[in-house]
Image (tube, rainbow, N blue to C red):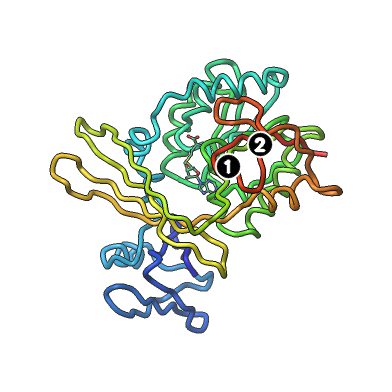
Amino acid sequence: MRIIPVADGRNFVLDPLAKAVPVGSEGLLLDGVKGCHLVEVDFEGCISSKTASWLEEQDYGFRDDISIFGQIALAKALFGWDASVELEGLQTHLAGVKHLLGLDVGCGYGRLLIPLTREGYQIDGIDQSFALIKDLNDNLAFQKQSRAFCVRMEEYISPGAYAYAYAAMNTIRYLQTKFSFLRHFRCMRENLQPNGIYLFCISLVPEPNKPYDIKWQFEYENQKYEIHWSFHSYCYLSEQITEKIEIWKTKKKQMIHREYQIQGFYPLSLLEQELWAEKKDWILEAIYDLCFHPIRITKDTRGTFWFKIRSR
Ligand SMILES: C[S@@+](CC[C@H](N)C(=O)[O-])C[C@H]1O[C@@H](n2cnc3c(N)ncnc32)[C@H](O)[C@@H]1O
């Protein structure tokens, strides 16, 4: 068990170095860096908010809004790079449906949703981060045509509500299991009108156990920081990749944040078999590189691509 529900409606995300084992229906036995502890759960299997804070102090993990995706200023500083190529590409592909309602899947703080709304698009955004959705709703208050909902992408259903949808910045990889991946695409099939377009961006990693360490610098609260986004481990049994993220203050070489993120492993063969094979729900229209140039890929291709699929 890696995600423990909290009674306040949020989640507690366990560090991969810790384990949680249910004990009957009343407790969880947690095994972490600082030893074993038994914690109480309510009748729905949730721990209390107080227990979640205590577990965080004891380094068992973090409440999901304490992740970088729950820290608005930090998330904006980290991901606030130039979005003009993405915006231009999306607008080219969505020009014909601009007057219809669309969906931004895992919209974050509205990096793409806000500028598209300003261009006249009407888009609903969904994201699991309460903090980001709250901030986005405040920003959208004056632009009534777009709305934001705090919900998981593998659970959100609004049948036939959307003419198109998009998921940028490799957000799809956060679907942690094959089950949640399949469920997400089933939900999206329901959410889209017949022939609806879904443009999603995903990184293909043919060898899921190959180490990498991506670093970039950014400014946050007038100070310079460096982020190290690296491969931590691959679990063959659950087919999940764990990434380690560390944020360092450049000057003092002091770490201000560390978290682990668990993701599913989604090779091209799985996309082909489950999404656009014969008798499946989708038709593959095209694959693009990050500049929206059409591209051909094989099972050995590594990189991040946009897939344009259409509901059958
Ligand atoms: C890398 S960020 C990208 C945000 C946005 N798509 C963009 O391009 O700026 C990934 C986002 O996915 C959200 N997320 C992760 N897992 C999710 C899930 N299961 N359901 C909904 N949102 C999720 C995170 O909260 C985060 O805002």
Q: Is residue 284 left or right of residue 44?
A: right
Q: Secondary structure at mark 1?
A: strand
The residue at the point 39 percent across, 30 percent down is 80
Compared with residue 20, is residue 63 higher up or lower down, i.e. above or below?
Answer: above
The residue at the point 43 percent across, 30 percent down is 138
The residue at the point 60 percent across, 47 percent down is 153
Q: Position of residue 61 (x, y in %)?
A: 35, 62
Q: Which residue is mark 1?
A: 202
Residue 9 in sight here: no
Q: Position of residue 220 (x, y in %)?
A: 26, 34
Q: Mark 2 and 1 residues: CB-CB less than 8 Å, in contact?
A: yes
Q: Secondary structure at mark 2?
A: strand
Q: Position of residue 1 (x, y in %)?
A: 49, 70
Q: Which residue is mark 2?
A: 307
Q: Quadrant of the C terminus?
A: top right
Q: Is residue 117 left or right of residue 158?
A: left
Q: For the residue marked with disc 1, what is the amino acid?
A: Ile
Q: For the residue marked with disc 2, what is the amino acid?
A: Phe
Q: Nearer the viewer, residue 82 or 212?
A: 212
Q: Is residue 68 left or right of residue 295?
A: left
Residue extending farthest to the bottom is 24
Residue 94 in sight here: yes
